[in-house]
Amino acid sequence: MNQDYIKPDNWSIIEEGFDAESVKSSESLFSIGNGAMGQRANFEENYTGETFQGSYIAGIYYPDKTKVGWWKNGYPEYFAKVLNAPNWIGIEIEINDETFDLNTCTEIKNFRRELNMKEGWYSRSFEAKLKNGTEIAVNVVRFLALDLDEVGIINYEITPLNKDAKIVYKPYIDAGVTNEDANWDEKFWEPLEVKHTGNEAFVTAQTFKTHFKVTTFMQNSILENGKNLNLSPTNFNTTTDKIQSIYAVIVAKGKTSSIQKIGGYTVSLNHSNTQSAAEKAIQAALAKGYNQLLEDQIAAWAKIWEMSDITIEGDVKAQQGIRFNIFQLNQTYLGKDSRLNIGPKGFTGEKYGGSTYWDTEAYCIPFYMATKDQQVARNLLTYRYNQLDKAIENAQNNLGFKDGAALYPMVTMNGEECHNEWEITHEEIHRNGAIAFAIFNYHRFTGDYSYIPEKGLEVLIAIARFWHQRANFSKDKNQYVILGVTGPNEYENNINNNFYTNYIAKWCIDYTYEQLQKVSLEFPSDHKRIIEKTKLAESELKEWKKVADNMYFPVSKELGVYLQQDGFLDKDLVPVKDLDPAQRPINQKWSWDRVLRSPYIKQADVLQCFYFFEEHFSKEELKRNFEFYESFTVHESSLSPCVHSIQAASLDKMDMAYTFYLRTSRLDLDDYNKEVEEGCHITSMAGTWMSIVEGFGGMRVKNDTLSFSPKIPKEWEGYSFKINFRNQIITVAITHVETTFSVDGTKDLAILVNEKKITVSPNSPIAVPQN
């Protein structure tokens, strides 16, 4: 743990006391979003201290030209940047002729931030003394509407405490923004038009190269003690990319003045005329008014929490952690638009670029399948299907593959590869396996097989072709090998026969072969269409099977473990416990050469295989491999602790499972990796959900049946969660005494509990004693 200023609370993220050193971290932690847009928790008023300003729009990006020291053939031309969008939250404020700025105030008292996760709003309140002696109380509430997802609203209240005050509000829109993360310090936005009409203002700009057009809008109302004064701006300041409205009021001591600012974005992805759409968005918001918009927000979040909440009794920090993770996931992606996906930082920062990694398939889909309608997960699968042609182009043009073999990108916005590290872009090929696994996992959990003949089988064929061509026959081993790869553990590059990669390659081929047989029998017209489209011949299938049936897996018979790669035991195997804590995190303290030669594991690698394919291995194999690899794992990837937590729980190592759960659930809140100011780790937050539901709850799907093996950390009094399994909602409540299962609806649900079959009927909860 590297920070401890967030106050424990069941439903809110709370910061008390102003600390300039924490501003950028808090800007990440208190970020808000609604699936269509999001923003860091920047101050609305001027702030001259250190800050990372960021607002983001889903699906809008810029192809920033790749910057490398030495160009290699096959490098992608650009690294997709999540764009810092035009700023609509800004409100410059003058109080008695002094610009209000917390960085220059002589005193700040009772500073408090709150991110209310239950109701979906963010607030700040404090008292401040300006250099001119004026003392004020400030209370600000801001939220991005879930129902009107192009709209956000700010209610900014100022109360003079010691004297009357002349307050000048200068709300603005600024399209002259730059990215914190940019390769060449280019401007990404081209201003097209600046307009204003009364209390409304608009800035239309488009991205260079990609030509996404965005109208950023605002509408301002000035109130006193809650009553709208119906003021018009006294003036406007305009440039080619910025507009600022001016309002001046005299406020008596003790009276409360406020500005309510409606703002947001309309984008060419959704509208042919973004200006007209912006005007309609403003009118829709005005028709509801601030109070109704807030009530709608609270109701919309209540509906989300009704299904996705996890309750924990007796451990406030654990409760706060899981709700923070669930809240951020829902802020980032709600499943409404199959063109969108889940970026590693969501709407909280710019690092990593792109909107899609293998994180979506490996970690996020289970959360969305279980807490929402299955269509949401199907949309995520459809996203990859729609980009299949680009994946085939990637394999063909960059790697020389043929006949429809596909390598899905490591990072993408539109299906094109846009990750510029060679050892990741072209070697971390296991991501293909995660995409195939997600198709299997979707069918296994939802029971919806229709996706496979309609779309999924084409994806599986292209991926199987890739693995067939990527493997080569070793005469020395008399088996097929896969050389020059990077596994999930990115602290080893360009190694041979990564166990996880080889295993999932074999599984992909076998699974695709099985689905071809099934579709042939049950969906003959789809089978015929797919065979004709892919030109798949029986002779090719035989070659696939030859590779799968003769795949090489490195193993140490002496240690009884699968080897992460051929040369792993050649390393100086000093366990993490003997590593000087001052050397951690090694990715910030060591040269890359030293990291690569070390035995230290960034994230679960062999154990990722055991997580995906648990039923393929014995509990004894899991135990040996877990204990061996855990001793070398530094967990410097946000994706690592959750997998270890799940497997530790499976092995009844509950103290370890709980420790890993806390690490994944509070990774950002406690800033374990000393980088939260860059943004939150959104995709790994789904792993936190998995740690409880699949780890402690032991949820699996076995033989087409939902299965549980419930356990509970000693630190908790109880916990509960809901699962939407094949359109039936089951609630699971676990204590140290028993686990209670109840089901909604009208149908019985058969489940397995500790391998024993029970049937749960609606309105008839069943309690099973703890083992």
Image (cartoon, helix red, strand yellow):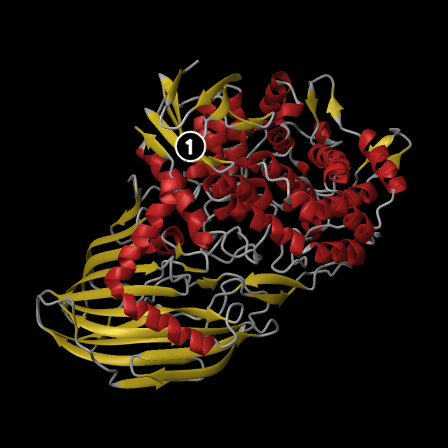
The residue under the point 83% across, 38% down is: 544
Quadrant of the snapshot with the C terminus: top left
What percent of the width, then of the height, locates residue 354?
Answer: 58, 57
Instruction: Name above or below for residue 228 compared with residue 398.
Output: below
Please say whether residue 399 is visible from this viewpoint.
Answer: yes
Residue of label 1: 746
Residue closest to the eye, 542 or 24: 542
What percent of the width, then of the height, locates residue 346?
Answer: 48, 54
The residue under the point 39% across, 20% down is: 766
Instruction: Name above or below for residue 308 compared with residue 719.
Output: below
- The secondary element bearing badge 1 is classed as loop
604 left or right of 117?
right
Residue closest to the eye, 74 or 314: 314
Quarter of image, res 229? bottom left
402 left or right of 31?
right
Could you tell me how many numbered marks the image carries? Answer: 1
What percent of the width, then of the height, locates residue 423?
Answer: 70, 48
67 left or right of 466?
left
Say few, some or many: other residues with alpha carbon within 10 Å of mark 1 (under 14 / 14 to 19 / 20 or more). Answer: few
Instruction: Name above or below for residue 204 compared with residue 731.
Output: below
**Amino acid of disc 1:** Thr
The residue under the point 68% across, 48% down is: 454
What percent of the width, then of the height, locates residue 702?
Answer: 58, 25
